[in-house]
Image: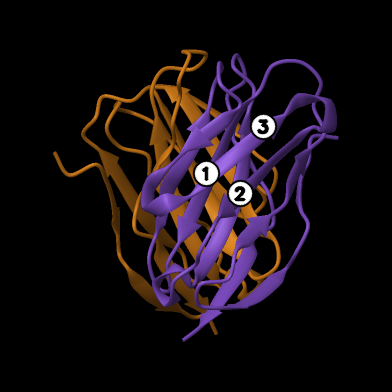
Chain colours: A purple, B orange
Amino acid sequence: AQSVSQHNHHVILSEAASLELGCNYSYGGTVNLFWYVQYPGQHLQLLLKYFSGDPLVKGIKGFEAEFIKSKFSFNLRKPSVQWSDTAEYFCAVLRPYGQNFVFGPGTRLSVLP
Amino acid sequence: NAGVTQTPKFQVLKTGQSMTLQCAQDMNHEYMSWYRQDPGMGLRLIHYSVGAGITDQGEVPNGYNVSRSTTEDFPLRLLSAAPSQTSVYFCASSPRKGSSGNTIYFGEGSWLTVV
């Protein structure tokens, strides 16, 4: 079955701590990978995406993600989080000739001031 | 350019009532979809459409109908609302199926409570 898993349901960090959120997917072959963020009460917004090329992708607000094909992983990182990063983060996968995005269950990030 | 627009933003229904969630996009996207978001379950696909006149079921289609008479609009109908349909609903669109570099764009969500 097609699936996307995210390692943590809820992560709590203090400001300035480093962040890494795990994402693994279960498809073989070529995939497109995404991280979306949902701030409280808002809709999903694209943080970054990987289609091809350099496996280290930089997104908005200082976020980056690394695609490791051998591990079927696309982990999200940020060196120093801020209180404003408190949100829910979703990893998503799209196969290039597929039609539907498959989302992971989400990781809630709480950043303490 | 408004992107993806959903209405209403909030709705309370009684069990057994029917209603339609509206979704419109102005980006000329071929692909549109409806997701529901529930705590701990992420986003689950309800129905999707790859173009006007074409719809198909997603992961959790039961209790919902869709139609796609135009490229712009993709309404979601709840036929007989049940408390299990209490959720946040997101409409989304993306460019043509299969094109490289696809990104999905979301509406702002519709909070539905069925009592």
Residue at image position (27%, 32%) is: B72
Report, in whole angstroms, how far the alpha carbon at label 2 lies from the one at label 3: 9 Å
The residue identified by callout 3 is A67
Q: Looking at the image, do the residues carrying marks 2 and 1 touch, with CB atoms under 8 Å apart?
A: yes
> Nearer the N terminus, badge 2 or badge 3?
3
| Percent position of residue B91, x then y | 42, 48
Give the percent coordinates (x, y) of residue B112: 46, 72
In the displayed structure, B13 sits above or below A103; it is: below
**On screen, residue B23 above or below B88:** above
Callout 3 crowding tier (Cα within 10 Å): few <14, some 14–19, many ≥20: many
What percent of the width, then of the height, locates residue B26?
Answer: 21, 34
The kind of secondary structure element at disc 1 is strand
> Extreme left residue here?
B1
- The residue at 50%/64% (across/down) is A80
Q: Secondary structure at mark 2?
A: strand
Disc 1 target residue: A64
> Which image quadrant is residue A7 in?
bottom right
